[in-house]
Image (cartoon, coloured by chain):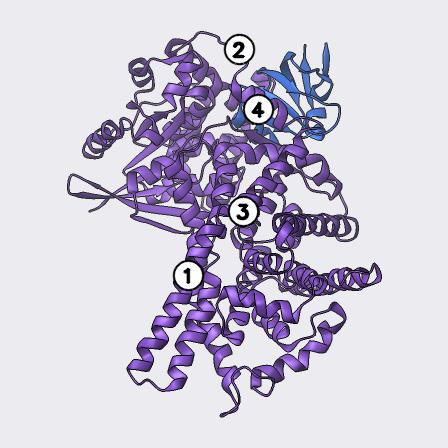
Amino acid sequence: MKIPLSEVKKGETVKVNCVSCGFGLIKRLSSLGLYNGSDIKVIKNDSRGPLILKVLNSKIAIGRGQARKIIVEK
Amino acid sequence: MKKKIALAGNPNVGKSTLFNTLTGTRQHVGNWPGKTVEKKSGRIDYKGKKIDLVDLPGTYSLTAYSEEEIIARNYIVENEPDLVVQILDATNLERNLYLTTQLIELGCNVILAVNFVKEAKKKGIIIDKKKLSELLDVPVVMIEANEMENIVDLMHMVNKRLKNKKIPRKISYGKEIDEHVCDVREKICEYIPAENPDWTAIKLLENDDEVIRQNKNRKGFMELWDFVSKQRMHLEKVFGEDIITIIAKARYGFIEGLTNEVISKQEKEAKTLSEKIDYLATHKYFGIPLFLLFMFITFYVSFFLAAPLTDGFEFIVGFLQEQASFLLNSLNASSWIVSLVSEAVIGGVGSVLVFVPNIFVLFFFISFMEDSGYMARAAYVMDRLMHKIGLHGKSFIPMILGFGCNVPAIMATRSLDSKKDRILTILINPFMSCSARLPVYVLFAGAFFPKSQAVVIFLIYLLGIAVAVISGFVFHKILFKGISTPLVMELPPYRMPTLTGLLIHMWERGKSFIRKAGTIIFLIVVVIWFLANIPYGVEYASRQSLIGWIGDMISPVFEPLGFGNWQSSVALIFGVVAKEVVIGTFGTVFDVGEQGLSAVLQNMFTPLSAAAFMVFVLLYIPCISTIATIKKETGSWRWTFFVLGYTTIVAWLFSFIVYQGGLLLGFV
């Protein structure tokens, strides 16, 4: 099932399917370990405000707007 | 020839700790030429040899995403350091190795210094150092940067590698990519002979703006570019993805293969203390109150804990003043010299210096917030609020740094990704009350609100934040309509900072306060002293003196705010040079130590007008250094003058509301 990252609930691990934002952001996200095919875990998602993800072994805060542009597979 | 080493690494991996450990006090802090990014360089003395060490900006990667990344890689390409030491975080080796792969692509002579090994062990991560070194063809040293552990081993390895340079073997990214890179490499050698054809090949394939910009005017580039574009299109077709993702995946593919062999993990998923703290620190409802509590403690402590120290300083200043007068009188110095030394120099500069303890404690806390990893959480919880003013949480960090000093705070806005965010964050930064304004509050709150000093000072700071946020909201609605930029920010693991680290950071930040007292503030108080003594024969610092006359000219402007006395006007005017001068001026014109200063002020102000005065000092025109920084960072006189005008109007209005509103409510 493919859904935007912003819809993923806390505690779930998902696989990134498509990052549809500018190349600049794709570069930044991939250097943090978030790219097509990588596994990420949602640590925090309070229906408002930014999400907190676990990418590789670090915590990354990402704006909700950006999270909507990242499609993931459950 | 002196050898050159560059220190590279991700943010938050202990890079500056290692830098301090290696160089000690032999450091120089400046800017990268033409950039607003700080450049730290230093010297290592190793067995009688002097080695230069340059601290590259902390980056996750060497793409051309940010100014920091461009600086780091251009330094390596252009200055060809003899050795690059990369410091890595053992608890997150995969991501740290992403930078390593790119250093190897660049053909650097690299050493890896793996930090936080003990912490990793506690988390069940064991790294096979020997295998890592073999597979990467790069020497690896395990260290604890903050405990000085194995620094000797590191230096030994550094020395060895400086003597025998060795470029690690190339990393294979799989047959398909390797072949394309190789083809492009050959064409590069044919068309535009480059120093570093392998690296240039990967970067051109990656569509790297900076490398394209550097080469596009060279003869033969167009032909080469046609070829590269075809190769890229072919790769994208084969993999069905964009080139950035293809190469990133290839690098991570290599890293995964590597770490599978090198790292043995015993999952320990128990909730760590870090998780528990984070649960509260980033909580929907508790997050912001927790942050406010932390700020309150900060101000409370920098006020009360430092009080005995401040008293000690006062005692010394008073003692010096007496001794200097005594000594000069016994030497039969003319009375004007005695007056200059004891009133202007010791009285004026001294009244500023007594606040050194408060300011250093404040900087200590700010350093703690940054070094412990809490700062990023504060930015996270403030994100929603910041969105209301068209910014995101990251802009909150320069705002907190503004509590220390607005100059580095405004410089810190360079970490923001968009120009609009930067300008907006810069415009509201002066309202964040810097430590130079703290002496004014400490003095006034102490004199007029002795029972609730800390609360009053805290309220002043909150007012500063409120005015910043309201202004941001107005600017966002009127000046910068449009979308806000993306937030992507690492929340680094919590780490207990070392005392030495904190003290070094506190000193680095606080020392400019002492330097200012010895230079510009000294100069200004001497000027004030002269103005207070002309025309010749006038009574010192009386209304008839030149300074009294200047003050009288301006004071009607402040009459409706409750402080129409000429001394306050003079203090505020000279306070634009540096905010501490407000106190320094009072110290000079009243010729009393700080203790006596409160008594004199009590005759001139009421509690209400004192409050209005504090509000005015909080909000009015930023000091000259801040103004200069605003000009430099925005690159625009228009914005600079806008800030000058805006802050003056806002300060006057708020002060007016406090005073007149207070009168209406029956306060005095």
Q: Chain of mark 3?
A: B
| Chain B: colour as depicted | purple
Which tag, 1 or 4, sits closer to the chain's start? 4
> Real-space Cα distance between discs 3 and 2?
36 Å
Q: Are marks 3 and 2 on the same chain?
A: yes
Q: Which class describes the residues within 10 Å of circle 1: few (<14), some (14-19), or many (20+)? A: some
Q: Which mark is residue B270?
A: 2
Q: Which mark is residue B277?
A: 4
* Residue where numbered disc 1 is placed: B315
Asked which secondary structure carries label 4, the reply is helix
Please provide percent x and percent y for residue B154.
26, 29
Q: Which class describes the residues within 10 Å of circle 3: few (<14), some (14-19), or many (20+)? A: many
Q: Nearer the viewer, residue B662 or B47?
A: B662
The residue positioned 48% from the left and 68% from the top of the image is B593
Q: Which mark is residue B412?
A: 3
From the image, state whether disc 1 or disc 3 is nearer to you: 1
